[in-house]
């Protein structure tokens, strides 16, 4: 099946007063129709930059150094703003962590959804309003006819995020980028939001790129998982492969920090050290200085993505046939409540 989204050898950098910052480095990634792909990693690893580059939402200080962005078979790498306006909303859409950065606090929710529909569809205002009410109903907003006329401050945080989702879905996009959409929500509302995304995927067939640092969320929603570190994909596979057969030491560290892996009375585990400064990336594996299993070659040469199964690969020299055998310190059972 042909992917609906492909990133081919994508590299993105930023100009800063101190020099060039390499935010995304030689990323290859694909997304299938109807798939939920989770991008996970610590803050600053490049997952948001990578996703926003597809919608061309990055600042003018950024640039695509190399690679291609292919959406639904079309190369949009060098699309200008005029062409991107036609894609945003109708083909590509995005929801962010804080809904109030998307919503206008002075305009009724219904009108904001209607504006999105009118922007991308040749319909009358009455048809757009009817569609907006349908969208409010789809995302689980009760009494949508009444709430259509309310401003955002009448809604709770979880309901605002649902309204943002309604705007994002209003023109039937093919791909939805969800950037930490549940981080600001409490646990109960977060679970409802995840169930909603799964339900909408089931009803519409939309493909979702879910950006998060919360592995508990990933276990609940993702079909596949890509682990990012220092601008690179260091491990990718099905959710089951990444959670129950992780191969990269960074993935081991992330899974080891889960509360479910901590015994009663113990402190939560952490990964020692800090990510590298991307003004001057190390020549080898960027995770080497934090990796207790690092080999000499890790400091000298960047590892390729070694295939483990047809769907699972990891960029670590521990998978080289010449490397010593190291057993994963993390052993999650499939019954583990992540």
Image (cartoon, rainbow, N blue to C red):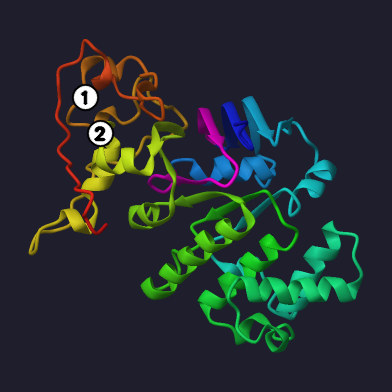
Indicate which disc, 1 or 2, sits on the residue closer to the N terminus.
2
In the image, which residues are magenta? 18-44
Vertical placement of 218 versus 148: above or below? above
Crowding at mark 2 (Cα within 10 Å: few <14, some 14-19, many 20+): many
Residue shown at 85%/64% (left/top)?
118
Residue 24 included in the magenta stretch of the image: yes
Residue 22 included in the magenta stretch of the image: yes
**x, y percentage for residue 235?**
37, 33
Residue 268 can be seen in this image: yes
Q: Which mark is residue 38?
A: none
Q: Which residue is mark 1?
A: 294
Q: Which residue is mark 2?
A: 249
Disc nearest the viewer among 1 and 2: 2
Vertical placement of 301 versus 285: above or below? above
The picture quadrant where one finds residue 77 is: top right
Position of the C terminus, as image quadrant, is bottom left
Q: Name the chief secondary structure element in magenta.
A: strand
Q: Residue furthest bottom?
A: 146
Residue shown at 80%/76% (left/top)?
130
| Residue 45 placement, left or right of 129 | left
Vertical placement of 63 versus 98: above or below? above
The picture quadrant where one finds residue 268 is: bottom left
């Amino acid at each position: 099946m042909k992917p609906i989204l492909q990133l081919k050898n994508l590299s993105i950098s930023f100009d800063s007063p101190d020099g060039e910052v390499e935010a995304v480095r030689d990323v290859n990634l694909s997304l299938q129709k109807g798939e939920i792909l989770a991008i996970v990693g610590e803050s600053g690893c490049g997952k948001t930059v990578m996703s926003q580059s597809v919608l061309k939402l990055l600042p003018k200080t950024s640039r695509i150094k190399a690679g291609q962005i292919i959406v639904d078979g079309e190369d949009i790498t060098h699309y200008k703003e005029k062409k991107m306006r036609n894609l945003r909303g109708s083909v590509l859409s995005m929801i962010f962590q804080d809904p109030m950065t998307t919503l206008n606090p002075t305009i009724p929710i219904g009108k904001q959804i209607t504006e999105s529909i009118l922007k991308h569809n040749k319909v009358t205002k009455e048809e757009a309003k009817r569609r907006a009410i349908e969208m409010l109903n789809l995302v689980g907003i009760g009494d949508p006819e009444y709430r259509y006329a309310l401003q955002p401050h009448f809604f709770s945080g979880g309901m605002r995020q649902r309204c943002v989702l309604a705007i994002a879905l209003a023109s039937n996009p093919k791909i939805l980028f969800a950037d930490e959409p549940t981080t600001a929500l409490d646990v109960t509302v977060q679970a409802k939001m995840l169930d909603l995304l799964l339900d909408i995927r089931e009803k519409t067939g939309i493909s979702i790129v879910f950006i998060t640092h919360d592995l508990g969320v990933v276990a609940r929603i993702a079909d596949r998982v890509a682990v990012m570190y220092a601008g690179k994909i260091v491990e990718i596979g099905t959710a089951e492969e990444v959670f129950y057969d992780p191969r990269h030491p960074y993935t081991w560290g992330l899974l080891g920090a889960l509360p479910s892996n901590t015994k009663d009375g113990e402190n939560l585990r952490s990964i020692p050290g800090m990510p590298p400064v991307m003004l001057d990336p190390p020549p080898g594996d960027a995770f080497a200085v934090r990796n207790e299993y690092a080999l000499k070659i890790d400091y000298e040469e960047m590892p390729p993505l070694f295939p483990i199964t047809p769907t699972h690969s990891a960029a670590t020299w521990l998978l080289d046939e010449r490397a010593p055998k190291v057993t994963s310190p993390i052993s999650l059972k499939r019954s583990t409540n992540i």
